[in-house]
Image: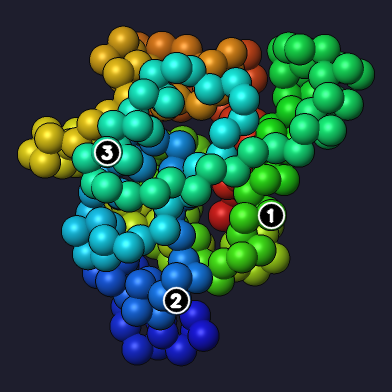
Amino acid sequence: MLGSHIEQRDLEAGTAEDILEWAFAAYGDKVAIASSFGAEDVVLIDIAVRLNPGVRIFTLDTGRLPQETYQVMEEIREKYRIPIEVCFPDRQKIQEVVNQHGFNLFYNGVEERRLCCQTRKVEPLREKLSELEAWVCGLRKEQAVTRSEIRKVEIDASNNGIVKINPLADWKEADIWGHIKKYDIPYNSLHDSGYRSIGCEPCTRAVKVIDEVRAGRWWWESPEEKECGLHNKHQ
């Protein structure tokens, strides 16, 4: 299905609106936006709701999110009058991981950090994706070295070959904030305190303007390691 659509239209040259219109037409209610409610994600929701008020939006609640993230979730839900599908990790698995490795295992090294991400994020995501034929993300090429080769429409080999759609792949950070200001979109207040990328509270910190966008995520690791498993390198 993906191949035939791409032959009909050069999606990589399309705008975010073009990509989303195509996705809604191609996949209907079998496509959904995955949102962590960072700056890119609220922009994506704004564009999507304008095109399709019934767009599906889901989020992964890891149990370790900052209060500011829950606040912007509520603000987005109320502004756009949309439901948000919340996915939680398996309680039994979380208990086992914490009991064996401790509350802050992610500081112990990449292997244990990935175990935490796998349990709290990757497994709930895969369960959700089993309901879908395509998913939409707010990834941008300039965010990190691990994302420099993403395409606007690609096959997600790490998630059973589902179609992965990145409408904002070629947007710059200035484009994101310009859109937020233009349309008065609610955003996570942590961005005003130097948080350029926001994940779980203990694994995120503020960074300098000159730093890479995701420098504050897992800051004790090298840039090449800074993915949780939701978005592996382009394949």
Amino acid carrying label 1: it is Glu
Q: Nearer the viewer, mark 3 or mark 2?
A: 3
Q: Residues within 10 Å of mark 1 (few under 14, many from 20)?
A: few
Residue found at x 34% / y 79%? 25
Q: Find residue 78 and name its label.
A: 3
User: In the rendering, at what x and y percent does residue 97 appear?
Assistant: 85, 25
Q: Which residue is mark 2?
A: 27
Q: Nearer the viewer, residue 23 or 63?
A: 63
Quarter residue 75 falls in: top left
In this view, the residue farthest toward the right is: 100
Mark 1: secondary structure: helix
Q: Amino acid at mark 2?
A: Tyr
Is residue 106 at all visible to an observer of this figure? yes
Residue appearing at x 76%, y 38% in the figure: 90
Judging depth in this view, the residue of 75 and 205 nearest the camera is 75
- Kindly state the secondary structure of the residue where label 3 is placed: helix
In this figure, what is the number of numbered marks? Answer: 3
Above or below 212: residue 179? below
Residue at 45 percent across and 70 percent down: it is: 29
Amino acid, disc 3: Glu
Q: Neighbour class for label 3 at 10 Å: few (<14), some, many (≥20)?
A: few
Residue 127, label in figure: 1
The x, y position of residue 66, in whole percent, is 48, 18
Determine whether 101 is above or below 198 in the image: above
Q: Are marks 3 and 1 in contact (CB under 8 Å)?
A: no
Q: Specify the quadrant that holds the C terminus.
A: bottom right
